[in-house]
Image: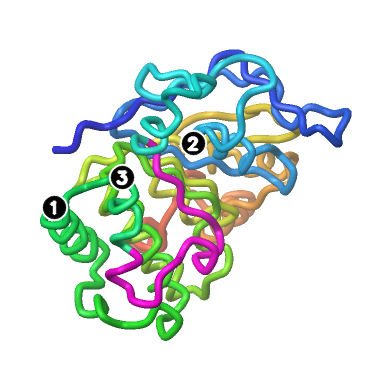
Amino acid sequence: MTITAEITAKDVCYQYTNSSALALNNINLTIKPGEFVAIIGPNGSGKSTLAKLFNGIFLPTKGDIFVNGLNTKDKDKIWEIRQKAGMVFQNPDNQIVATIVEEDVAFGPENLGIPPKEIRQRIDEALRTVELTEFANKAPHLLSGGQKQRVAIAGILAMKPDCIILDEPTAMLDPVGRKEVISTVNKLNKQEGKTVVLITHFMQEAVCADRVLVMEKGRIVMEGKPREIFSQVEELKKHGLDVPQVTELAYLLSKENVPLPRDILTVDEMVDCLCQLL
């Protein structure tokens, strides 16, 4: 099992230089080793800003971020921090740098000075994990959006991070591509033991997490397990968010006196509950 990372935010504020308002306001948070945390919220709520702080791309205006006890403000430790907490961005084209898939996956380890024999092992292992072994010698531009994003994930995996931070990795993908990527993310967490932080606009993706954080105006306004969060349909709507479609259906049916639980998260759960009623 992988040794996984813990991320801690203590009294964190962040302010962009061209803004008078705080993008993040007094964030206190601990993400435990091996935990899968989904962060949701409306546009401008601070989700992506927080993700970039976790990786040391941004530094707090006030407060501190620690990755396995290392402060992101420590310039001497920043590359060690980024090895521990790898970042996957929204657009895979911005993260793919080579003309062949396996060369792209090798890029990170090569820059870390890893010996060639070990790089070869890391490439094979990373491509196997994201189920792209057969595409090792393909050109990335010939792949689908979902496959490209999995190549980007493989490139991060090859650097052996303890934690993977994904900033809306499925935002530019079609439903098939989204399913491929989220399946890979779940595999990394459940089978590889990676700590996962997923920033997403898609509520159904957050259902897979151990914990969901809801952000608004730079603050964490709700926090809990997916069932706890998504059963609060009216509260989420106040924050400008939707819930998984099947959860909203259960909510609407229960308002019409159909005796259904309000914390249904999946189609299978809905089918089981309806079958019991019938």
Say which amino acid is labelled 3. Answer: Leu
- SS category of the residue bearing label 2: loop
Query: What span is colored magenta in the figure?
Result: 85-104
Q: Is residue 271 visible?
A: yes
Report helix, strand or loop for mark 1.
Answer: helix
The location of residue 246, given as percent across then percent down, is: 51, 59
Residue 65 lies, in percent from the top left, at: 51, 21
Give the alpha-carbon distance from disc 3 to disc 2, as whole Å. Answer: 17 Å
Residue at image point 35% right, 66% down = 104
- Which sits in the foreground, 46 or 254? 46
* Quadrant in which the C terminus appears: bottom left
Q: CA distance from mark 3 to mark 1?
A: 12 Å
Where does the image place residue 78, in percent across and percent down from the top left?
45, 29
Which label sits in the foreground, 1 or 2?
Answer: 1
The mark that comes first in sequence, 3 or 2, is: 2
Are there few (<14), some (14-19), or many (20+) residues within 10 Å of tag 1? few
Type of amino acid under label 1: Glu
- Label 3 belongs to which residue? 112
Indicate whether residue 212 is drawn in magenta: no
Which residue matches tag 1? 118
The N terminus, quarter of image: top left
Q: Label 2: how many residues lie within 10 Å, few (<14), some (14-19) or many (20+)?
A: many
**Tag 2: residue type?**
Asn
Which of the pair 251/55 is nearer the observer? Answer: 55
- Residue 55's disc is 2
Residue shown at 72% from the left, 48% from the top: 43
Q: Confirm whether residue 276 shows in the render.
A: no
Give the left or right position of residue 46, taking residue 97 as reference. Answer: right
